[in-house]
Amino acid sequence: MDDERKWYCVRTQTKRERVASENLRELAAVEVFCPVLRYRKATRRGKIWWEEALFPGYVLARFHMQENERAVSFCQGVRGFVKFGSVIPDVPEWFIREMREAWQTHAVEEIVTVMPALEKGDEVELAVGPLKGLKGQIVDILPSVERVKVLLEFLGQAQAVDVDLFSILLPRKPMPIDFTP
């Protein structure tokens, strides 16, 4: 009999990763890792802070399978386990360790806040509005008002235009706020 606690990938109900992880944490012998991303998102109501799980529909939990399988699978917010046929594979300890180390460098309570990664000189494309599709170069970044100044070539000359940060296609993926390459 294997007495070792192992990490498993637990399936959650849609958009209920946080609920499942909180309920799993209430179980005495279960350790949970549920990394969350926090970012700004443009909506009809304006810009809002949005939080979602890094692995939508899943949380990682460490427990004794034989002792806690039933309690974990019937926990509120949980749909079951990731299975291959009838086999429930464990997640390697090294993967969780490296993931946690990388995550905790930038996280506050398992939440990493990400912001658009922009630099002066980046080539961007306007995604909305009457100038949609035009490409230009960033000449200034105004983070406090979430705007950028883009040099666009139109009407036969270059024009510097202030645009909303959420109306451009980003040249690279968003990064954690405190990230320095």
Image (cartoon, rainbow, N blue to C red):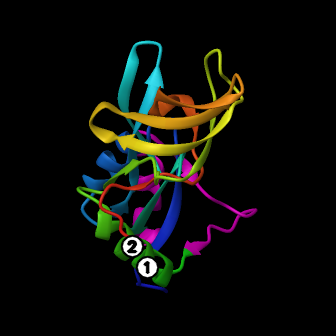
- The reply to whether callout 1 and callout 2 are in contact (CB within 8 Å) is yes
Residue at image point 40% right, 47% down:
115
Indicate which label's residue lies in the foreground, 1 or 2: 2
Q: Position of residue 5 (x, y in %)?
A: 40, 78
Task: Looking at the picture, tell me which residue is in the foreground, 42 or 31.
Answer: 42
**Left or right relative to 148: residue 126:** right
Q: Tell me where the magenta segment starts and ends, as one range.
A: 63-90
Badge 1 is on which residue?
98
Above or below residue 81? Residue 88 is: below
Q: Which residue is mark 2?
A: 102
Question: How many numbered badges does the structure rendering display?
Answer: 2
Indicate left or right for 60 with 83 as reference: left
Amino acid on which the number 2 mark rests in the picture: Ala
Check disc 2: other Cα within 10 Å, few if <14, some if 14-19, many if 20+.
few
Residue 57 bears which disc, if any?
A: none
Estimate the x, y position of residue 172 in percent, counting from the top left.
57, 54
At label 1, the amino acid type is Glu
| Residue 126 at least partly seen | no
Is the residue 143 above or below the residue 160 in the image? below
